[in-house]
Structures are given as C-alpha cells and as structure tokens.
Image (cartoon, grey):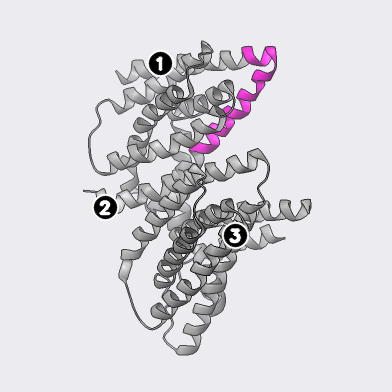
Amino acid sequence: MAAALLLMPGLAQAHSPMQGIGDFYGGVLHPILVPAHALALVMLGLCCGQGGLYAMRSCYLGFLPALAVGLVLAGAGLDPGSSLEPVLLLVAALTGVMVVLQLSLPHPLFAAMGAAAGLLLGLDSAPEAVAPGPIAAALLGTSLGAFACLLLIADLCERARDQWQRVAVRVAGSWGTASASLVFSLRWLAP
Amino acid sequence: MMWVNRLLWGAGLCLVWAGNVQAHSAAEIGGGFVSGLLHPVLGWDHVAAMVAVGLWGAFLGNPALWLLPVVFPLIMALGGAIGIAGINMPSVEIGIALSALILGAMILLAARPPLWLAAAIVGAFAVFHGHAHGTELPAAVSPLAYSLGFVIATGLLHLAGIGFGMLVRWPLGRIAVRAGGAVIAIAGALFLSSAV
C-alpha cells in the first residue's frame, strides 16, 4: 500500500502548486517532485542509514532545524534564484561517494551534512503562493514531505543487513553520484 | 518484522522511482528520463559492453561482482563531464567497440587479472561510454532525468550480465558464459570494423 501511495505522485506532476491538491499537499510532494531535491534526500538517507541509528539521529538533528530555517527564509521572500540546484547536486554527489565508500564517519559530520542539505533544500523550496496562510501550509507540507522521505530512505537503509542489500545501497550511491555529477558538470563545464 | 522490511524496501524503491520520473513538468521529466533510459539500450555497442561488465564481474566473483558495476558509472560520469566540457576525445566509437571486444575476450579466455587491473580496464572503457552520453546530455530536455535514466539503464544492463553470469556455478553454465563472452567479442569486432 505504501508503495502504491508513493507511486501516486507520478500522476500529480509539476514543480509547485499543483491544481486541485492544495498548498499543503503540494508542499508535501514538492521534495519528491523536484529531481534534485529527491536525489539529495535519497543520497543523504542512504548515507546516514548506512551509518546506523546514531548517525541517523545526528543527521536528523542537523537536518530538521536547518530545513526549518531555510523554509522560513524562503517563505519570507529570500529568493536565491536557480543557483542552489547545482549546490544541492554537489551535496548529493559527495554524499553518494560516501555511500559508495561506506566510510565510517564521525557523527558530527552527519549532523553537518544534514544541516547543509536541509538548509539548501529549504531555501530552494519557495512556495508560489502569496497569502500568508497558503505559504505556511506549503512550507509545513514541504518540511513534512522532506523529512518523511529522508526518514523512509534512512530507515530502509539501516535495515539492510544482507550482503546483497548492502551492495544495492552502494550501487544506488554510485548511480546517484554519477547522475548528480553529470548534471553538475553540465551547469559548470558546458561551453 | 520481515513484512516491515519488505514493505519498506518496496516503498523505498518506488520512492526512488517516483523521484526519478518527476520534475517541473511531467512531459519534460518523463521524456528526459525515458530517453535517457532508452539511450544505452538502443545502441548495441553500449548494450554489449554493459552486459560484458556484469558478466565478467560474475565470472570473477566477489568483490568484482559488485565492484565493477559500481566503478563503471562513477568513471562514466568523469567521461561524461569531459564530453559536456566539449573536450574532444579521439576515437570514441573505436573505444566503445574495443570495450565490447576486449571485455568479451576476457570472458571467453576466462581471464582472472587482479581486482585493481580489472577495475582499471573497466574504468578506462567507461570513459568512452560516458563521453558518448555526455555529449548528448546538453540536448536533453531535463538533464537530471536523462542522466538518471541512462545511469539506471546502464546498471540494469550490468544486472542482466550478472544474472547470466551466475550460471558459472555449473560446468555447463560456465561454458555458456564463456560462449556469451565469445558472442560479445565477435560483436565488438564487428563494431570495430564499422567504426574504423
């Protein structure tokens, strides 16, 4: 059922406000609908899930407050333009490398990675609504959607005990790194 | 607890899938992802080389089984960046054809080089494949969806090779895998003759 629910976003497309689903649900789906956001969240989830429960807690402790700050700033009208997406992709690529290498990292680093991803994600999620009520609803939805996505991936990864599952996590890390670094290159290297 | 594990794995995989096919507009993302997904599959030279990577990994056993398919996309991204930057690489098509020929020959001959050498060979060829993909990336409607599509397609082709390569556990399967390597090597030779 969870799988079916997660597939439903495929029917409701577009970056932001989606007709008919309202600001709150539009915000919930936003982190999954924007590929760069989804990729960054998946890579972060894989990385901290791979690190175990303490790493996950550290990551959440950094991620949640930074996401809240980023969203509040975005809701207040701070518009960083399109410059944040490449930075998010860079974060996704670096996190993916850590997943591939399966490094045993100090827990404060997970908090820092979570904070960086949360802040960038929040700043890059400015709602298109203009009235305070819909803006608040969209921001609340985005924070819930982003955290739920991170939580699911991290928990899934933490439960990976069999060797093939651990390998699948590392393979997913390599795929994410390859995609993110290619698009990052496109932004900076394309003539 | 097993059902919770299965549910979470299923949900997680779907979430990854959902993330891949979404974007700012359905047509852009869906189109970008599908064209990226089809790109390696529609080129027989890519298909032969990708399957050979998985096949050789399975033939070599752990840790090459998973290390080669992990190394490939990472180095392929490097080749892609070179292509995106507009840096010309000489004889990309020849390099791709050679990858099928050499990797097929490795399987046919049951070559078992040290792990670092196998990874270096696969990585060297990945640069050519990445360059070919990278030069087409700027034209993609949604570059991230396109890149995710072709990276996933590449991984699935590796997986197909690994699946077939698992036959090496049985004596007859070992012969079948080596025969598969021969077919890939012959195909590589044909690609090479048309590329030269």
Does B174 lie within the magenta span? yes
- Above or below residue A178? Residue B142 is below
Q: Amino acid at mark 2?
A: Trp
The x, y position of residue B148, in whole percent, is: 46, 48
Disc 3 crowd, CA 10 A, few/some/many (<14, 14-19, 20+): few
Please report, as a chain letter, where disc 1 is located: B
Residue contact at pointers 3 and 1, CB within 8 angstroms: no
In the image, which disc is placed on residue A188?
2
Q: Which mark is residue B190?
A: 1
Q: Helix, strand or loop at disc 1?
A: helix
Q: From the viewer's side, name the closer residue of B37 and A70.
A: A70
Viewer-side label of 3, 2: 3
Picture mark count: 3
Q: Chain of mark 2?
A: A
Q: Residue at x 62, y 12 (%)?
A: B175
- Per the picture, the main secondary structure of the magenta-coloured stretch is helix
Distance Cα–Cα, label 3 vs label 1: 54 Å
Crowd rating for badge 1 (residues with CA inside 10 Å; few <14, some 14–19, many 20+): some
Extent of the magenta region: B154-175
Residue found at x 53% / y 69% = A61
**Label 3: which residue?**
A54
- Could you say which quadrant of the image residue A7 lies in? bottom right
Q: Amino acid at mark 3?
A: Tyr
Does the magenta segment cover residue A169?
A: no
Element on which disc 2 rests: helix
